[in-house]
Amino acid sequence: MIPHNKPTLGRAEQEAASRVLASGWLAQGVEVEAFEREICTYLGLRDGCAVALSSGTAALITALWALQARGKRVAIPAYSCAALRNAVVMAGGEPATIDAAHQSPNIDLEQAIKSGAQIIIIAHMFGIPTRWHSGAISVPVIEDCAQAFGARIDDRPVGLRGTLGVFSFYASKMLTSGGQGGMVVSTDSALVEAVRDYRQFDSRRDRKARFNLQMTDLQAAVGRAQLSQVDGFLRKRKETYSRYAAAGLPLWPTARPAGTESCNYRAVVRAADPADVISRLKADAIHAIVPIADWELLEVPEKVPRAAAVARTTVSLPIYPSLTREEIGAIIATASRLIQSAQEEPR
Ligand SMILES: Cc1ncc(COP(=O)(O)O)c(C=O)c1O
């Protein structure tokens, strides 16, 4: 079976983990500091603009705490991961779910702005960036880049246009820090310090309640090994996406916002009957999934028709960097055959 997703792990990650184990220091320490510095360098930020956390959800929660989200209306995309709603609720905010934009998996920004929300979370779903003019939004923006490390807006990495950017390093993301991990970035030093303050839960005189949301040195060392290879991962994903496109697979969305570059986190095709396509792919030993089903939407489907349509008509194909040429060929062969037979079948 060709898995739908798989982390790309090798000797570099094994050596990184062994180095930390041999050092005897496992908790947050020098590796986490180095990972934060290297993320800043990669994104073109000055040192001190990144804070590592235990997950993307922890990054979202601390970003919301830093923006003092308690009691505020927070616009979130209906077509996204439950982590967004969970983080808003845990930070004491009031989620306002917004439908997807036309022909896009991403939030309808116009509707988000009109909703009167005091904070907007923009998630770059499938690795496809939402582009907006900085002056167009007057409230703080959290850019959720969990699926979008390496994607670009106007030739700058995603995560830098919003007030804060958050990343996930979960096992199947663009890079992983040993299975779980996250990062908050911002050029606003007061916000960065607020996130750091929440993370430092122990030995505090002010007695404020804080969670332990720290990343370990073991995680950070694996994350550093992955970061050093991420340009290769991005190239490989781009090549695979191009092969799927050249083979005529009905990739969706067909157009990307001008001035943006996707990181190809997902290769999504449109299908009238996703369950049927998934079971036929499975018969050929290919695991595909529905990226977000209608019951997983962050709003009842009737209220978000565009998000519901995306949820009901999309299938995500494998696209991770370690796919072999033969596996890519097999995916193309089966997916093309399915599409052809769907076209031939009477409707
Ligand atoms: C868009 C989005 N935001 C946030 C998250 C949460 O990240 P994590 O799983 O690292 O908590 C995820 C992933 O699971 C995601 O896809």
Image (tube, rainbow, N blue to C red):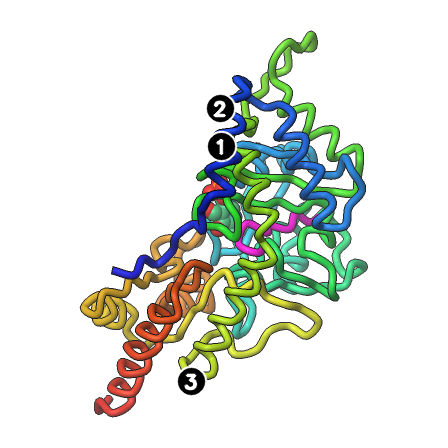
Residue 71 in the image: above or below residue 82: above
Q: Is 74 contained in the magenta span?
A: no
- The C terminus lies in which quarter of the figure? bottom left
Q: Secondary structure at mark 1?
A: helix
Count of numbered circles on the image:
3
- Point out residue 238 in the picture as x, y percentages from the top left corner: 54, 69
Residue 83 visible somewhere in the drawing: no
Q: Picture quarter containing residue 206?
A: top right
Mark toward the viewer: 3 or 1: 1
Q: Using residue 102 as the reference point, say whether residue 249 is left or right of it.
A: left
Question: Label 1 is placed on what type of residue?
Answer: Ala
- Residue type highlighted by circle 3: Gly
Which residue position holds label 3?
A: 248
Task: Single out the mark in the foreground, 3 or 2.
Answer: 2
Calculate the distance from the C-alpha at mark 1 to the C-alpha at mark 2. Answer: 6 Å
300 lies above or below 90: below
Residue under numbered circle 1: 17
Residue plotted at (26% across, 85% down): 342
Mark 3 or 1, nearer chain start: 1
Q: Can you see residue 254?
A: yes
Left or right for 308, reference 200: left
Under tag 3, what secondary structure?
A: loop
Numbered tag placed on residue 66 in the rendering: none
Q: Residue at label 2?
A: 21
Provide residue 222's location: percent of width, then percent of height: 52, 38
State the separation of the CA atoms marked 3 and 1.
41 Å
